[in-house]
Image (cartoon, rainbow, N blue to C red):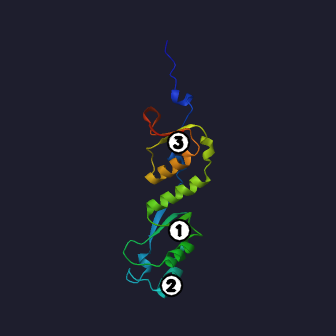
Amino acid sequence: MEKEIINRIEKSNLIQVNLDEFYPLGERISLDITDFLVEGLVLREKPFRETVAQKDWSIYQDKFVAILLKDDAIVPLWAYMLIASKIAPFAKQVVLGNLETLEIAIFNTIFEQHNFSQYHQKNVIVKGCGKYPIPETVFINFTLQLQQHAKNIMFGEACSSVPIYKR
């Protein structure tokens, strides 16, 4: 007679959270505004505005966009603001920075809308390995939000978790 296999993790009061479940699908792209500058270095207002006006911004439809400047040119803040205002009607989200900055901003927006109270006085394991490239800062931001509600926070897998926080 065989013994029934019992999954003790499922029977426990542990909640496993995989941040991959929060990951919104959609292309992430960076827009280097060097191409909008004279010789890639100098911003002259009139040519800059003309280039911005001629650009087909609809190519950013439903994309997450990071506006950046790869070279050492000095660009006034209004230039980034102008470009962001043109992309905004099409893109899902726009930030100033690199793709990691974009990813962090995407998750911060999601966490602002997430109901963390569902973890009230619960034991939570935050899984670390996933299929999406989630920056470490996202894990920190999630933990800080979770800490306001959870009884215990652990990191890893149920069989080998690392304690992070205990109320």
* Residue on which disc 1 sits: 60
Above or below residue 57? Residue 4 is above
Secondary structure under the numbered disc 1 in the rendered image = helix
Q: Residue 50 carries which label?
A: 2
Q: Residues within 10 Å of mark 2 (few under 14, many from 20)?
A: few
**Among numbered discs 2 and 3, the one appearing first in the sequence:** 3
Where residue 155 sits in the image (x, y, percent)?
A: 46, 40
Q: In this view, does 102 lie to the left or right of 121?
A: left
- Label 1 to label 2: alpha-carbon separation: 19 Å
Q: Residues within 10 Å of mark 1 (few under 14, many from 20)?
A: many
Kind of residue at badge 1? Tyr
Secondary structure under the numbered disc 3 in the rendered image = strand
Above or below residue 10? Residue 133 is below
Q: Which of 69 and 74 is in front in this view?
A: 74
Q: How many labels does the image show?
A: 3
* Residue on which disc 3 sits: 17
**Hey, which residue is sitting farthest front in the picture?**
167
Q: Quadrant of residue 119?
A: top right
Q: Residue 38 carries which label?
A: none
User: Which quarter of the figure is the C terminus placed in?
Assistant: top right
Whether label 1 touches label 2, CB < 8 Å: no
Q: Nearer the viewer, residue 120 or 98?
A: 120
**Among numbered discs 1 and 2, the one appearing first in the sequence:** 2
Above or below residue 112? Residue 57 is below
User: Residue at 44% of width from left, 59% of height from top?
Assistant: 100
Kind of residue at badge 2? Glu
Where residue 124 sits in the image (x, y, percent)?
A: 53, 39
Whether label 1 touches label 3, CB < 8 Å: no
Where residue 40 sits in the image (x, y, percent)?
A: 38, 79
